[in-house]
Image (cartoon, rainbow, N blue to C red):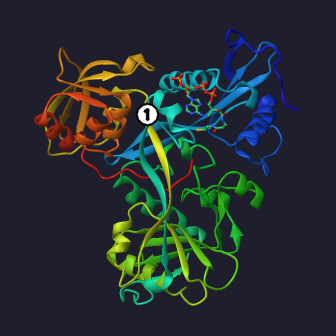
Amino acid sequence: MRDVATQFSTADVTIRPVTRSELPRVFELNRLSFGRSRGGLAAGTDRPGLARWGAFGRRGELLASVADQRQSHYFGGRAVHAAGVTDLAVGPEYRGRGLGRRLLTRLLAEAHSRGAAISTLFPTLPALHRRLGWETTGSLTWYTLPAAALAGLRPAPDTRIREATTEDLPALARLYQRIAAQGNGLVERAGPGIGAVPRLPAGFVAVADGVESAAAVDTIGVAAAATDDAAASEGTIAADGITVVEGPDGDPEGYAVWTRGTGWGATARLTVHDLIATTRRAHLTLGAFLGGWAGGTPVLALRLEEPDSLRRLLPAGDLRVESEEPWMLRLVDVRAAVAARGWPPHLSCGLAMEIQDSVCPWNAGLRTLVLHEGSAILDTASSARIRIDIGGLAVLYAGGSRAATLRRCGLLTGGDAQDDAMIDAVFAGPRPTVLDRF
Ligand SMILES: CC(C)(COP(=O)(O)OP(=O)(O)OC[C@H]1O[C@@H](n2cnc3c(N)ncnc32)[C@H](O)[C@@H]1OP(=O)(O)O)[C@@H](O)C(=O)NCCC(=O)NCCS
């Protein structure tokens, strides 16, 4: 039975952490909002690593809630502490009265206090988050490819391909981290926040050597889920296999995590959740492995952080975007965010700007971004030619846009072409992305 506030007034609302005994009410609100079951979670337990906040009415009734998940994302080669926002839900009767805004504003203040430098989320309503300083920076992208497009590839002769065992998992985790650190936005699957909890942002229940090993599986950034229902409710997937490619010295150089869908015929699919290759030869051998499915499983669905490396191996066929799920970034503490990420190592310069942030006022004001030998600090400034909205700065921070594009969106004003050239050099890519649904 849901709470129903008969005399709801915004002045009566208290925002505070959700207690254990209130979890069932939060889960029911989430079920109504997102259609998710909580199968697999024992009573009184929650996904680890989440701090849940609730908005309560005068009689203690739950009106709305949101959760902050500790995680880190790579930017410029370094992992940056983040508040991953999830499960924002306002009771159907109480929407449109400012509760969503109040909860998110509180979450930002709390995230700031606990030392999160940035915040990330997958929006269902970008307008709401944009008003509060998040901006769309990248997407989680699934591609499709006919398996026949890879059938012409041959495994590289100096590689060996085999099924993974649980002993491989730490090495495979390192391969992912190596790739993730080369990009912008990718989740640090074994980072301090995530490493401290068994649940990770997205992933799989892997069965290696016939034994489901939650602890080991966590080391490659996959989620432990007790049942398929739990897996489905958490957005996790039961993988059928993890395939490893070793180089000539026996060290893993790449892997694929995959699930064979049901059915046979033109639409039968192999879903490839991770395709990680750190060398060309590993790429070729994994490509040939995927091409080997062409007979009975002609469709490959691939979650890729960087499509071009696979595209450049294709002897034929077309890699097409099947779905794109945008994610948004906010700078919770600009100073900390600037200090935490890596920067272009050969640039030494100062960029003065006026940052506009009405929701997190500690970020606002005249600042100079000072770069030196791959690191940066944010200093106070006495004047600035450019003005930038906090959402626009998030897009730049992620490597997600050129200055000219931000100007066209109204997120950057002032200054001239010289300033834009410096902005483009300071905030040069790689293009932000993620592989995990959090
Ligand atoms: C989306 C949701 C969380 C919004 O909460 P809410 O309490 O109704 O939103 P608020 O009243 O605080 O509105 C906050 C801002 O977003 C804007 N907004 C809210 N709903 C909107 C909509 N459907 N379209 C456009 N803007 C919207 C408001 O205009 C407001 O802007 P303002 O503060 O500048 O005036 C709520 O409708 C909900 O729970 N929906 C179902 C679950 C869901 O979709 N969750 C979102 C996960 S990202």
Between 153 and 354, the one nearer to me in the picture: 354
Q: Position of residue 23 (x, y in %)?
A: 77, 33
Left of 420 or right of it: where is 210?
Answer: right
Can residue 229 be seen here? The reply is yes
Q: How many marks?
A: 1
The residue sitting at the right extreme is 1
- On the image, the x and y values in percent for residue 383 come to 17, 16
Residue 314 in the image: state x and y as whole percent.
Answer: 36, 80
Please identify the residue farthest to the left as the structure is shown.
418
Q: Is residue 433 above or below residue 404?
A: below
**Residue 78 occupies quadrant:** top left
* Amino acid under disc 1: Arg
Q: Can residue 227 be seen?
A: no
Vertical side of 90 occupied by 322: above or below: below
Q: Is residue 341 left or right of residue 303?
A: left
Where does the N terminus fall, quadrant-wise? top right
**Residue name at image x 80 percent, y 13 percent:** 7
Query: Front-most of 420 and 50?
Result: 420
Residue at image position (68%, 27%) is 95
Whether label 1 lies within 8 Å of ligand 1 gets the answer no
Looking at the image, which residue is at 34% across and 73% down? Answer: 279
Task: Examine the image and state in which quarter residue 96 appears.
Answer: top right
Is 360 left or right of 407, judged from the image as shown? right
Q: Work out which residue is located at the far top of the displayed protein and give it.
A: 11
Q: Nearer the viewer, residue 371 or 408?
A: 408
Q: Position of residue 137 (x, y in %)?
A: 40, 44
Residue at x 45%, y 77% (from the top left corner): 245
Ligand 1: image quarter: top right
Query: Could you classify mark 1 by the number of other residues whose Cα lies within 10 Å: few (under 14), some (14-19), or many (20 or more)?
Result: many
Q: Is residue 44 left or right of residue 409?
A: right
What residue would you read off at disc 1? 330
Could you tell me which secondary element the residue under label 1 belongs to? Answer: strand
